[in-house]
């Protein structure tokens, strides 16, 4: 094994390891830290003292003794500092301030006009400003030490440059990280929204304790993210896991990405509403036929969901059909990736009782025998998974990048 001989680098590595273990386990004895890191007592104590001076940990009570002196318990202090999470989505910009376990302390939201050419920078600026001001009212604003940003599109996770986001036209060639840093003065980390939803599940949700967590978000748009033992799989160009643009129909409808027959063209909200329109014309119910004449909007889709929940056969049939399409794409992903669990999120969670069974049935029929019974569940975080994940991204960077840099 290659040994690290650079002493400052070695110490940084040890601090990161000890810090991450205390965060993950929440409370741990010095002895356990030594056992888990193979470090002797003096360096472990040195690191604990440093973290204690910075407020990240405290010593509480005494743990179970294995004979001799009773050991201290080192506990992570979640409210020592705060982080900001921002989510830039298709129809809204949201922000939260959370503690270091990503529990929400404050939030803020702004609607985005769904015009593709709208400049949404003033909206982002407003959300950041409001959070800093609101939060400044109850605590010292300097206690927010980092920010994570979730973006609905491809964004370079290192530089923060937006690579592609067909749904947010103006965002091309825009550096999101620099822009947010200018607005907040904070160290900022950026990532695709579905990757962050996957990260949130890995740390706090249904993916906790699993090595390979696949998140599939379906609703207005369709995307997926994969976390492998805590690391987001980004691909070579930060554009991996584009399940929404896997081809389902050769020579199918043209997709906004430029290709034809993508999953987006048959299962995203606009496609769903189109499918509903097609079937609803034959319905005997006036209410259903009237809705079919409405123009597409988030509200009109949610009205179809209301119909389904009240038992309308047409609405249920359309949701199940879309579930089949998502199920086929999921089966393909299982065959390629073999994750431990698939966590579903996105706006279809509003009809999860109907769509989930359809997705599961389709996967059981189409996936490779070894993977066809992979657990498939909906996230408990509803539409907040990526926003929480944005906070988790900031926290993870504090743990990993050397926390000294974050404390002013
Ligand atoms: Zn496409």
Image (tube, grey):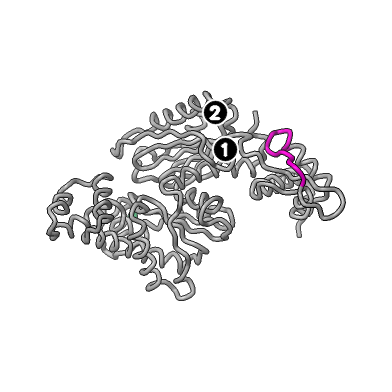
Can you give x and y, in whole percent of width and height, for residue 355 in the image? 34, 60
CA separation in Å, label 1 and label 2: 19 Å
Quadrant of the drawing holding the N terminus:
bottom right
How busy is the neighbourhood of tag 1: few (under 14 within 10 Å), some, or many (20 plus)?
many
Q: Which residue is mark 2?
A: 185
SS category of the residue bearing label 1 = loop
Q: Left of 271 or right of it: where is 131?
A: right
Q: Left of 266 or right of it: where is 237?
A: right
How busy is the neighbourhood of tag 2: few (under 14 within 10 Å), some, or many (20 plus)?
some
- From which residue to which does the magenta span run? 51-62
Question: Does 46 sit above or below residue 310?
Answer: above
Q: Which residue is mark 1?
A: 99
Question: Does 18 sit above or below residue 363?
Answer: above
Q: Left of 259 or right of it: where is 192?
A: right
Quarter of the picture for ligand 1? bottom left
Which of the two discs, 1 and 2, labels the residue nearer the N terminus? Answer: 1
Q: Which mark is residue 43?
A: none
The answer to which of 110 and 183 lies nearer the viewer is 110
The answer to which of 324 and 355 lies nearer the viewer is 355
- Marks 1, 2: nearer the viewer: 1
Give me the residue at 48% from left, 26% from top. 134
Can you give x and y, in whole percent of width and height, for residue 351 in the image? 33, 55
Give me the residue at 26% from left, 60% from top. 316
Can you give x and y, in whole percent of width and height, for residue 353 in the image? 35, 59
Can you give x and y, in whole percent of width and height, for residue 301 in the image? 26, 49
Question: Does 315 sit above or below residue 21?
Answer: below
Does the segment drawn in magenta span residue 54? yes
Quadrant of the drawing holding the C terminus:
top right
């Amino acid at each position: 094994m290659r040994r690290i001989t650079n002493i400052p680098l070695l110490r940084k590595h040890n601090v990161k390891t000890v810090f991450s273990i205390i965060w993950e386990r929440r409370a741990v004895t010095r002895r356990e830290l030594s056992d888990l890191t193979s470090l002797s007592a003096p360096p472990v104590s040195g690191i604990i003292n440093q973290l204690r001076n910075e407020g990240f940990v405290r010593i509480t009570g005494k743990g179970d003794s294995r004979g001799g002196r009773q050991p201290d318990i080192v506990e992570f202090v979640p409210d020592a500092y705060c982080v900001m999470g921002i989510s830039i989505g298709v129809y809204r910009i949201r922000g939260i301030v959370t503690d270091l376990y990503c529990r929400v302390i404050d939030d803020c939201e702004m609607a985005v006009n769904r015009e593709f050419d709208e400049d949404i920078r003033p909206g982002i600026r407003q959300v950041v400003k409001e959070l800093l001001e609101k939060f400044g009212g109850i605590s010292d604003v300097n206690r927010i030490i980092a920010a994570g940003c979730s973006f609905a599109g491809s964004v370079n996770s290192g530089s923060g440059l937006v690579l592609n986001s067909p749904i947010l036209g103006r965002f091309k060639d825009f550096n999101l990280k620099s822009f947010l840093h200018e607005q907040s003065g904070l160290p900022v980390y950026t990532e695709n929204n579905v990757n962050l939803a996957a990260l949130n599940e890995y740390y706090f949700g249904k993916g906790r304790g699993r090595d390979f967590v696949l998140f599939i978000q379906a609703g207005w748009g369709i995307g997926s993210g994969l976390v492998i033992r805590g690391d987001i799989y980004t691909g070579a160009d930060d554009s991996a896991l584009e399940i929404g643009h896997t081809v389902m129909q050769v020579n199918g409808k043209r997709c906004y990405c430029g290709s034809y027959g993508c999953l987006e063209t048959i299962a995203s909200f606009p496609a769903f509403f189109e499918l509903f329109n097609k079937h609803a014309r034959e319905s005997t119910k006036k209410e259903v036929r009237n809705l079919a004449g409405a123009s597409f909007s988030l509200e009109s889709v949610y009205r179809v969901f209301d119909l389904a929940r009240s038992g309308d056969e047409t609405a249920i049939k359309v949701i199940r059909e879309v579930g089949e399409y998502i199920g086929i794409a999921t089966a393909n992903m299982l065959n390629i990736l073999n994750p431990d669990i698939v966590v579903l999120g996105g706006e279809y969670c509003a009809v999860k009782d109907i769509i989930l069974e359809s997705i599961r049935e389709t996967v059981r029929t189409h996936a490779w025998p070894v993977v066809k019974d992979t657990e498939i569940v909906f996230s408990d975080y509803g539409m907040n998974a990526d926003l929480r994940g944005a906070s988790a991204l900031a926290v993870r960077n504090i743990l990993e990048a050397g926390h000294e840099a974050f404390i002013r």
